[in-house]
Image (tube, coloured by chain):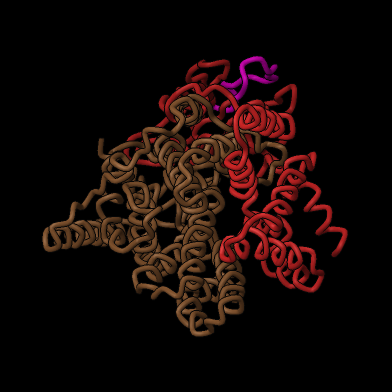
Chain colours: A red, B brown
């Protein structure tokens, strides 16, 4: 348990530099903060929380209750941002003349160097529209949705997480659960759809089994087999994807 | 326009209920905004969870929560009229110290503006949205709550465990009332409001902690901005959640509820130290913050209780005011109820 908890703390700290700045701020406030109430909340409570976080008995009990994925959130109770900023602002207030400016610039530089700019995170992208889902999803969903009823469609894995955020009337035989490796739910239809070369003799029966009105495949993928043999037709080509319509499934009630 | 009304004007108006006798350094429109929103969130949680567990239609949530919203506004208007108080205090503007460094304030506003523009312009690819945002979209479309699988759309048994923290349903409510698609409310409207509110809370914390020292306040805020903007040193930080996943309840827990609890506990401990009487409405706010924690995340109940419990115990010991533990425990009761429900339903 100790190893798991320390590993979690290490992951939370990242490079550890911001946490070091926080610990320095904590030590500074321990020495300089005169008001008891502020000392309690900014210094003593965080220390107790840290002792609890690393306490194997507490960790075991809570781990059991909330699971391993969210135990780290106890660390959110440490007011890292507020304490560090407050300590820096207090120190700034005590200085005079040019020292003030020098300190403010040095502290700001310290934070910039210690941290990592959030918008440089590779998961951040320029939004393509006000829905914050890819344009391709918007165009495909708008093309296949049927007013007044739900539609079943199989999407490539790179799109599944966006589809039902944008259009909840489009149902899918598999969704985001297939994209999470640790959930290990990889199976049949998505497996066939993600292959480099699509074999319709294998894909079409699986799609029919799931009752898919539409199957969406990337345009660049090679497809083996005649769509007409499976009563499929090309419904639309858009944004680098081909939408196939299975005529075996009627869309009219 | 309707979004501004729901996310700013109404909470500010309702927040005037908590403005009287509030700490001098908290007085102003920002405290009204935060306290009003906390109160409304708590009401939403208390209305919504029973309806989810009873598998009622989302329509009832809309009706009942709208009624509570209207009643709260009426109550605020009535009190404002009776006491000839201004429902919206502009003390923040009036009290602005002209000697404050204009440059530092300009930097703060510019960086805040940058973050708000980025919240609209940029998107963070997060798989959890496929769950939370889809729930908001389903709720707006089908009027059912937690009875469809968000990933696939198939009908399912009630997902009561997630239903205990119905932050996505609040987003669906905003979407339904404003007429904007839930996906846009979740990805654009809510992040802008919540990021701004987080800095509002930092402002209140700065004002309270620095107590009248106006000069370092903008610097304090700039440092908070830097720590947030450069908070991507780890995937797990509350700062990362605040900017990258602000539409998810857990982000609101880390960047709004926990800082607000810190602020309320600071006020409480200060009043204990000064031997001041603690007003009932203060406890109402503390309870509202705790309940909002439950609205945001199922983990919220535990985190809020932990923070309030430790801080309350420290305060009681340090200031020898043991009686304070009773109302604080009462404030945590809703969390305990939700936690027990969670354990039963899990």
Q: Magenta span has A223?
A: yes
Whether residue B43 is visible, yes or no, is yes
Whether residue B290 sits left or right of residue A185 in the image: it is left
The residue shown at (72%, 32%) is A110
- Name the image quarter holding residue B93: top left
In the displayed structure image, the side of residue A133 where residue B51 appears, left or right: left
Residue A197 or B146: which is nearer the viewer?
A: B146
User: Vertical placement of A3 versus B311: above or below?
Assistant: above
A35 is within the stretch colored magenta = no
Which residue extends farthest front? A97
Provide residue B234's location: percent of width, then percent of height.
72, 41
- The residue sitting at 57% across, 15% down in the picture is A240
Relative to residue B171, is residue A41 drawn left or right? right
The one nearer the camera, B117 or A141, is B117
Quadrant where the image shows the N terminus of chain A: bottom right
Q: Please, is residue B305 above or below residue A82 in the view? A: below
| Residue B137: x %, y % from top left | 42, 43
Quadrant (top left, top right, bottom left, bottom right) of the C terminus of chain A:
top left
Specify whether residue B157 is in view.
Answer: no
Residue B97 image point, x, y percent: 37, 38
* Above or below B220: residue A32: below
Q: In the displayed orientation, state which residue is furthest to the right.
A: A3
Q: Which residues are magenta?
A: A217-231
Query: Splitting the image into 4 quarters, where does residue A45 fall?
Result: bottom right
Residue at 41% x, 73% y: name it.
Answer: B276
């Amino acid at each position: 348990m100790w190893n798991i908890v320390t590993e979690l703390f290490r992951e939370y700290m990242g490079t550890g530099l911001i946490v070091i700045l926080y610990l320095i701020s904590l030590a500074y406030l321990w020495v300089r903060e005169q008001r008891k109430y502020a000392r309690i909340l900014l210094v003593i409570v965080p220390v107790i929380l840290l002792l609890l976080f690393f306490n194997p008995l507490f960790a075991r009990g809570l781990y059991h209750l909330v699971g391993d994925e969210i135990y780290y959130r106890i660390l959110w109770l440490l007011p890292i941002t507020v304490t560090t900023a407050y300590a820096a602002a207090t120190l700034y207030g005590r200085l005079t003349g040019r020292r003030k400016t020098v300190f403010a610039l040095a502290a700001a530089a310290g934070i910039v160097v210690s941290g990592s700019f959030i918008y440089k995170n590779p998961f951040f992208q320029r939004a393509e529209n006000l829905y914050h889902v890819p344009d391709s999803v918007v165009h495909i969903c708008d093309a296949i949705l049927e007013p007044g009823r739900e539609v079943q469609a199989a999407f490539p894995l790179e799109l599944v997480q966006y589809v039902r955020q944008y259009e909840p009337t489009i149902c899918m035989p598999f969704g985001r659960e297939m994209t999470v490796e640790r959930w290990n739910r990889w199976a049949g239809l998505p497996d066939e759809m993600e292959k480099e070369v699509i074999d319709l003799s294998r894909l079409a029966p699986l799609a029919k089994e799931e009752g898919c009105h539409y199957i969406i495949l990337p345009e660049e993928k090679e497809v083996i087999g005649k769509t007409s043999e499976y009563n499929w037709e090309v419904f639309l080509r858009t944004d680098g994807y081909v939408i196939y319509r299975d005529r075996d499934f009627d869309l009219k009630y | 326009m309707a979004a501004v009304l729901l996310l700013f004007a109404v909470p500010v108006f309702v927040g005037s209920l908590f403005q009287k006798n509030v700490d001098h350094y908290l007085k102003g429109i920002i405290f009204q905004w935060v306290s009003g929103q906390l109160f409304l969130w708590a009401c939403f949680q208390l209305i919504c969870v029973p309806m989810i567990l009873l598998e009622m239609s989302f329509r009832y949530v809309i009706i009942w929560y709208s009624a509570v919203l209207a009643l709260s506004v009426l109550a605020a208007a009535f009190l404002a009229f009776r006491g000839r108080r201004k429902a919206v205090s502009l003390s923040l503007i009036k009290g602005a110290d002209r000697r404050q460094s204009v440059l530092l304030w300009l930097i703060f506003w510019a960086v805040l503006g940058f973050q708000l523009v980025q919240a609209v312009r940029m998107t963070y690819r997060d798989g959890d949205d496929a769950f939370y945002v889809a729930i908001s979209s389903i709720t707006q479309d089908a009027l059912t709550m937690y009875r469809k699988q968000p990933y696939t759309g198939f009908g399912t048994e009630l997902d009561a465990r997630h239903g205990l923290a119905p932050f996505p349903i609040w987003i669906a409510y905003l979407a339904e009332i404003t007429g904007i698609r839930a996906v846009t409310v979740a990805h654009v409207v809510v992040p802008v409001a919540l990021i701004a509110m987080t800095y509002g809370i930092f402002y209140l914390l700065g004002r309270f902690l620095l107590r009248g020292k106006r000069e370092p306040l903008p610097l304090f805020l700039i440092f908070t901005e830097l720590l947030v903007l450069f908070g991507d040193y780890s995937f797990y930080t509350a700062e990362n959640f605040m900017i990258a996943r602000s539409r998810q309840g857990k982000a609101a827990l880390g960047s709004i509820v926990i800082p607000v609890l810190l602020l309320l506990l600071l006020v409480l401990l200060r009043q204990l130290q000064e031997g001041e009487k603690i007003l009932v409405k203060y406890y109402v706010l503390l309870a509202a913050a705790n309940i909002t924690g439950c609205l945001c995340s199922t983990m919220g109940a535990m985190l809020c209780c932990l923070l309030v419990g430790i801080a309350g115990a420290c305060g009681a010991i340090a200031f020898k005011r043991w009686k304070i533990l009773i109302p604080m425990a009462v404030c945590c009761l809703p969390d305990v109820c939700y936690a027990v429900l969670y354990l039963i339903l899990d």
